[in-house]
Amino acid sequence: MKYLLMSLVMLLALSVNEAKAGERSLSINDLVDQYYAAKEDELTVKQLPPTPDNVGDPRYCPPLGPSCTEVACSTLGTFGCDEVKEVETIGRACRGNFDGTCLRAACTRLGTFGCDGMPEVERVARACVGNYGDECVNTVCNRLGSFGCDELPEIEKVLQSCAGN
């Protein structure tokens, strides 16, 4: 009887966690949509339509900070990025990032031990691809609250949803 009761309690807890995870993913998508809607309104007010001369010109997306590789290596510490293999791994993970602004913002959200190893930094750097700056991730994470972006899967989902901004 005792084991049956424990099994029922665990099953109930798992189903509640799965339901909350489903709600959170919808919530993240809704928040990203709200962020983009506000940005579109802001651009409409400023009336800055793209011209044929500046579409696709990389000068209109200049780096906002140090490179992704620099931020990744500084996050990993002295011995985390001191071999050619490690630098190559970071280089592949950072491919497609505008700079290190997104990686720095995401690792700050994860805390000291959430982004201190090569696997975590790789995952965050890959999730940052397509994110220019840190406005979207900061806006969405601020709306989600303190515990909405403090774990790697959560921040990955937000970054992937923000990609393309």
Image: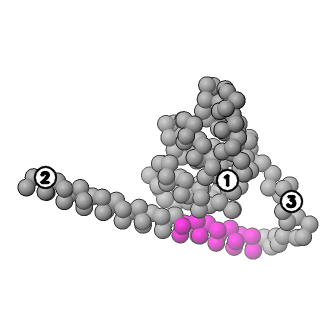
Crowd band around label 3 with a 10 angstrom C-alpha radius: few (<14), some (14–19), many (20+): few
Question: From this viewpoint, is residue 111 visible?
Answer: no
Task: Decide whether residue 137 is among the magenta residues.
Answer: no
- The amino acid type, in three-letter code, at marker 3 is Asp
Judge depth for marks 2 and 3 and give the one in front.
2
Q: Is residue 111 above or below residue 37?
A: above
The residue singled out by tag 1 in the image is 129
The residue singled out by tag 3 in the image is 57
- The amino acid type, in three-letter code, at marker 2 is Tyr
Discs 2, 1 touching: Cβ within 8 Å? no
The residue singled out by tag 2 in the image is 3
Determine the residue positioned at 49% across, 59% down: 144
- The amino acid type, in three-letter code, at marker 1 is Val
Q: Mainly helix, strand or loop, the magenta region?
A: helix
Residue 57 picture location, percent across and down: 86, 59
Q: Earlier in the sequence, mark 3 or mark 1?
A: 3
Discs 2, 3 touching: Cβ within 8 Å? no
Question: From this viewpoint, is residue 102 visible?
Answer: yes
Which numbered disc covers residue 98? none
Q: Please tell me which residue lies in front, 29 or 139.
A: 29
